[in-house]
Image: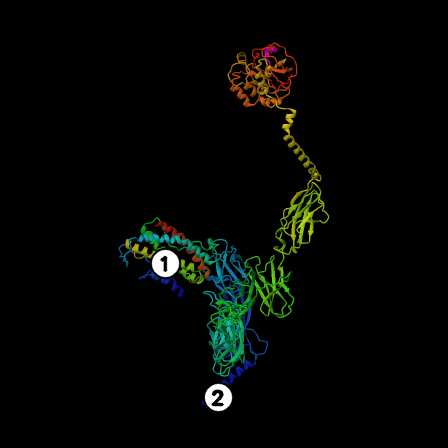
Amino acid sequence: MKVLAAGVVPLLLVLHWKHGAGSPLPITPDNATCATRHPCQSNVMDQIRNQLVQLNSSANALFVLYYTAQGEPFPSNLDKLCRPDVTDFPPFHANGTEKARLVELYRIVAYLGASLGNITRDQKVLNPNARSLHCKLNSTSDTMRGLLSNVLCHLCSKYHVANVDVAYGPDTSNKDAFQKKKLGCQLLGKYKQVIKVVAQAF
Amino acid sequence: MAVFAVFQTTFLLALLSWRTYQSEALSEPLPLTPESLKVSINSTQQCLHLQWSVHSLAYHQELKMVFQIEISRFNTSNVIWVENYSTTVKWKQVLHWNWESELPLECATHFVRIRSMVDNARIPEPRSWSSWSSWEEVDERNSLGHGALFVFPKDKLVEEGSSVTICSISRSYQNNVSCLLEGVQMRGEQLDPNVSAFHLNNVPFIRETGTNIFCTTGRGDGTGTVLFVSKVLEEPRDFSCETPDFKTLHCTWDPGSDTGLPKRQPSQSYTLFESFSGKKILCEHKNWCNWQVAQDSQEMYNFTLTTENYLRKRGVNILFNLTHRVRPMTPFNVVFKNISDTNATMTWQVHSIGNYSTLFCQIELHGEGKVIQQHNVSIKVNGNYLLSELEPDTQYMAQVRCGDANHFWKWSEWIGKNFSTLEAAPSEAPDVWRNVKSEPGYQTVTLFWKPLSKSHANEKILFYNVVIENLDEPSKLQLHSIPAPANGTKLTLDQCSYQIHVTANNSVGTSPASVIVVSGDTGNKVEEERVNVTEDGFSMSWKPQPGDVTGYVVEWCDHPRDLPCDLQWEKLGPNTTSTVISSDAFIPGVRYNFRIYGISTKRIAYLLEQKTGYSQELAPSDNPQVVMSNLTSHSFTLSWKDYSTESQPGFIRGYHVYLKSKEGECHPGFEKAILPDDSVSCKYKIYNPEQKTFVVENLQPESFYEFFVTPYTSVGEGPLDAFTKVTTPDEHSHLLIRIILPTVFCVLLIMIICYLNSQWMKEKCYPDIPDPYKSSVLSLIKSKENPRLTIMSVKDCIPDAIEVINKPEGSKIQFLGSRNSLTDTEITQPAYLYLLPTEKNSSGPGPCICFENFTYNQAASNSGCCGHVPVPPEAPSQLGLLTSPENLLKVLENNYMNSLGEIPAGETTLNYVSQLVLPLSRDKDSLQTDPPVPALCSEYKMQMAIPLGLASPPPNEKSSVSSVTLLDQGEPHH
């Protein structure tokens, strides 16, 4: 429970520092008011694109670094242990409207941010000496947080969307070590796959 | 009423006591059946946890009982474990018992039942078991949740080398599960249609983050588990405790391997327990711990060091007397006092270990990185020691350590400090030697000295003083100051005797003087001997000198081939008559010369012996230049007089003369030898190194020989060079020379004489024909004016007959001049015609045919071949005259032949049938009319051609009378 509190919950609190955080967030009705603390920068959409490009360019390296750090049998059984079968992963439709794509992007980034928090926490226990992996995970999480903030700002300023209902991946704190490694590998495989599509869509 | 009540109560109590007694005394089995059995699973420990109670116990009753527990797996009939558990049971007590399963409990249904028996000695045998409790079933498989495959145990912590059983549960019956440990397949066992077990013996330690075990059914993805393997907890080694001050005990040990696993198992802990005091402390460090000594004068200590982790616990024990475990603290305050050039006093202090304790201290003096002095001293609190026999101006390091003198246990740590002794004047005179070269009128003395050792120099040497004292004039002193680090100087002195003092000086003072005397005497010359060489060096000895000798000096050069040769010397005492000279500079193949001098009481050195030798002889490196001389048909002489035997890499012992001949036979004195190139040669040995000539004899004339001369030493001969080739001359050639040369000489002499006398011979044999026009007779005739008298002209000679032979073909002669035909010109302008040979016959002999021009021209007669030159019938040598280009040009210039056409050569040929001499009285008119009279032409024989018309008619136009007929040399004459 302590682990849970130190991992996902603070992340969620940071991401949704307002009333109602932690529960599925409905899209704000069009007539609802949406206010941001600071006005979005004019090039926020460019920033979003750049952040997506950055995440896409580093996703594969993070994936390789991860499964290498887990040791055998992960590097030699990627098809069985790291298959991107994440059933509850938020969908993304590249041919949708910009607003719809931004909303879906928000859900994906929120999902990934929480999952990366779990993976980072687990790897600090399972592979405490894998410094480069920890660094890469932290860097990706930081970029993810910035992206989430920009997407939310853009949704709010342009489309007046203040709240988006999001879903999170399974909590791995009660899983055994092998399951933690496997779920993390699957998630990063999925992340590598999805971020490429998303980056191309923007 | 009250009495009744008391009675009744007493009766009931008595009855109760009786019943109790009855129940114990009668040994009747009590129905104490275990009840309320509950079974649970501790997955982490893989334990079945049982708890039950015995309800039938009386209030506050304690009863020793035995519980028999049966455990079955998969079904109740498959009993896998039976164990009796004895304990004392109290009233209302809940009993607990654990059983650790080898197979993960999640993989199988387990059934447990229990029964009991009173284990009381007052109850006689046989005692009986209670009835079994009902089977309690535990099955975790129902709570596994969704999933196709499960692997247990999860995240199990085991020791390296232990055995582990992994089990898998598959939801499908058809799936064959296989499990891999780091890529290596594990051997499995099917326990149930859904359950497989994999036994893993001697688990290896692979990494701190765990060993992955991966199981798959071959379809879909797989799953696995992580086995956390830790190092085996080792027993602490070298556990010991010691005190520096009777206040604390410092205990140390070697912990061995760290069994910690990050986030899984902390490193093993260490606990120190002292049994006499009953105190226990948890050590903060993994290899040492401090224990506070009690103030109650406890002397004996019994320590138990216990180490443990999640998996194991180990301990070691030591028992000791505190006073026997004293290791003093490191001394302090080390100071050096009263430092002089050779002494220093070292003082130090130690921490007190008791009022009456004595410490035993050890002092070490280090110089140049090694221990040069070691001393022991006993002290109480303050220590001091006088370090003596030190070298001046030297840096030292002195250190001290102490131990308990009463019950020595261990030395304290060293404490040291550097110090330097004071400087001093050089303590020893420099070792001086000299080299004297006497020249007419003066002597050159070169002084050499060796640098003083550090122990003798006592400080850096600044300069050397050389004082020269003329022994013949003691008042004359010269002082030369040579700055260091020079190791010699050169002096030019006259032929007087001199005493030379050499001293070394540093900043403190002057060393004792080294004195040598040189005199103008050049010394005696001694024979040079060869020196023996041993493994240690050159071993030499000399005869002891009669009289007073203060010592001997052996002198040599380390590099005799260089200049300067690096003069070395060794001074020896007066009683020494042998020594072994060795030097790292000695190299094989170099001749070293040693001179042994005796030193007189007047310090004059005189040469005793000279020795020479090689540290190691080598074979000659080159061969002599051999000159061959006196080559005859049977011998020749070889000489190599320029070859020096002194500068060779070994003592030349002689020479080998190799001779090769075609016959391959060796001459007397030669022996067959196989050369390094495997060729066979004849070898002659010359045993005298000074014999540098050799006569090779018994050779065959006109034979080919090869020779080669090489020197040899004790090691071998020189390199194999090319053989020199020589061929002996013919045996009679000299005879021929003796005959032919004089003969040739004589012939030449005769020829010279003949030549010289040729004029005489000419005059005698064939004198010059006098020119009649130049004859003195003419003057006589002119003077007499007799017109009839004339001189016979050769032109008047008419050949009697000419045979003209027509030739069908022949070469044509190209005449220079115009194209007019000869016929034309013959008629109008008679002239001398020159018959020119063709190129074809230029080399061959040919006759000269002239046609008379009755108008005689003196110039022409002198210049042409038709002049007054006799032409014999066979006189081809005269052609040269005819073909003389000068003559021809003269003729042409005088227009004797103005124009001539081409005349086919060979059409006609003239043959002289005879030659006639005209009578001197005839004139020109009568020549054609008078028949010729055959007669000898006196001394003049003139060959002439007559006009063709006189001989025969011309065959054609071209063959006119005046035409020139050419003789083809290629055709035969008739």
Circle 1 Cα neighbour tier, 10 Å, few/some/many (<14 / 14–19 / ≥20): few
Which chain is home to disc 2? B
Number of other residues with Cα within 10 Å of mark 2, as a class: few under 14, some 14 to 19, many 20 or more = few
Q: Residue B444 falls in which quadrant of the image?
A: bottom right
Residue lying furthest front: B784
Secondary structure beneath disc 2?
A: helix
Is residue B663 depicted above or below B32 in this figure?
above
Q: Nearer the viewer, residue B365 or B652?
A: B652
Residue A78: % across, % down: 46, 54
Q: Which residue is mark 1?
A: A142
**Quick check: marks 1 and 2 in contact, CB under 8 Å?**
no
Compared to A138, does B414 lie above or below?
below
Q: Amino acid at mark 1?
A: Asp
- Residue B418 seen in the current view: no
Tag in front: 1 or 2: 1
Please tell me whether residue B77 belongs to the stretch shown in magenta.
no
The residue pinned by badge 2 equals B7
**In which quadrant of the rendered image does the N terminus of chain A lie?**
bottom left
**Label 1 secondary element:** helix
Q: Is residue B519 visible?
A: yes
Q: Name the foreground residue: A151 vs B767.
A: B767
Count how many numbered circles sit on residues in the image: 2
Q: Which residues are magenta?
A: B946-951
Which residue occupies the foreground of this view, B476 or A18?
B476
List x then y, in percent, for residue B236.
Answer: 52, 71
Residue B769 vs B321, above or below: the answer is above
